[in-house]
Image (cartoon, rainbow, N blue to C red):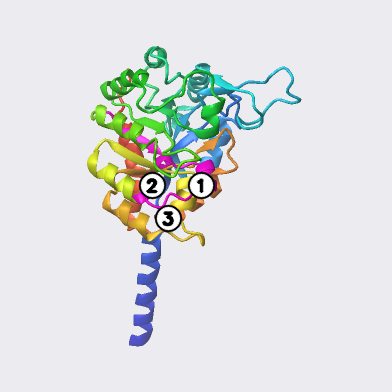
Amino acid sequence: MKKILLLVLLALLGAASLVGAVPPPLVDGEVHILDFNQSSDGLERFITVMDANGVSAAWVMGAPLQKMWQEHAPRRPVAYESDDAPVYYYSATDVIVARQVLKLPPHQRRRLYPFICGFNPTDRNGVRHIRLMLELYPGLWRGIGEILTRHDALTRLTYGETARADHPALDAVYELAAERHLPVLLHSNITSTRETDFIYQGEVERAVARHPATTFIWAHAGCAANIERRQHLDNLAAQVERLLRQYANLNIMLSWTLVSHYLLDGSGKAQPLWVTLVRRYPRRFLVGSDIVGRWDKQAAALDRVRTFLAALPPEVAALVARDNALRLVGGGKDG
């Protein structure tokens, strides 16, 4: 009888440990509810998909660029790389996001944290657009971004001057973000597809250093699919650790190629190097799916994220999966 009771107790303890290891509900920190044609599957459908994928809340934003449909193109391009036509900055993306979010019932709206992104990061007038959005939709916005700077193919297709993280036009944006307590989600590739050195890292570092009162979230830590096709960034974790150690206002969004090629190995297991890094800085990492206008890929993207989270202590997984994202947007004052 004692042996039976012991076995039952061990089984219960084992079940409890398994429950504790289950990652918490996620906050998806990188959701573009519009694509580069300013269309999507719709926010009503997105709420349903969030529920199916165990997502309690999401940071949502439009797409700051619109793909041009040129005169001789045989069909409308569906993505920015569909053809060689350029893309241009499209400020109405923020109005579309605001109107779609505000149409939702309050209990659904409270799960979404909209970000302003529809401005040209090389134009000193860009900050005026942000101020206008804050004035037109007071109390709505919870962040700025995703600001698209170095972005390989997308950069080459974008009209005008090349955007970079430390561009003078962004100084006023970063200052406004600090003033209004709005986090900044920044995309800046750490290098180009043809270089082995981290030639663009300095641009991110200078921006973060110049604006210590601004909260930055670096999307994918500068990784990109086109870079990964040509080279693996072997010392990426070491560089990320140095930056986190040096700059208290920098955070990392664990999404897209960073998850697939660095957080997980070829067999889909969590990389010990990155597990150690996240455990060392548990309040500096967030997670995101980086879906763009279509919701069918969120489940697979977040499944990879959950694989990594399962390798973390439960209290660290909760911070990375949910608490850090809510903390960064919960205090937003944009009125």
User: Are circles 2 and 3 on residues that touch, CB within 8 Å?
Assistant: no
Q: Reading the chain from its start, which is encountered first: label 2 or label 1? A: 1
Q: Can residue 211 be seen in this view?
A: no
Q: How far apart are marks 2 and 3 (CA)?
A: 10 Å
Q: Which residue occupies 37% across, 17% down?
A: 138
Residue 180 colored magenta? no
Which of pointers 2 and 3 lies earlier in the amino acid sequence?
Answer: 3
Amino acid type shown at disc 2: Ala
Going from N to C along the chain, the mark reached first, 1 or 3, is 1
In the displayed structure, would residue 285 be above or below residue 151? below
Of the numbered discs in the image, which one, if any, rests on residue 202? none
Boundaries of the magenta span? 214-237
Which residue is labeled 1 in the image? 228
- As helix, strand or loop, the secondary structure at mark 1 comes to helix
Of the two numbered discs 1 and 3 in the rendering, the one whose residue sits closer to the viewer: 1
Q: Is residue 282 left or right of residue 154?
A: left
* Residue 305 place in picture, x, y as percent: 45, 50
**What is the quadrant of residue 191 in the picture?**
top left
Q: Does the magenta stretch include residue 230?
A: yes
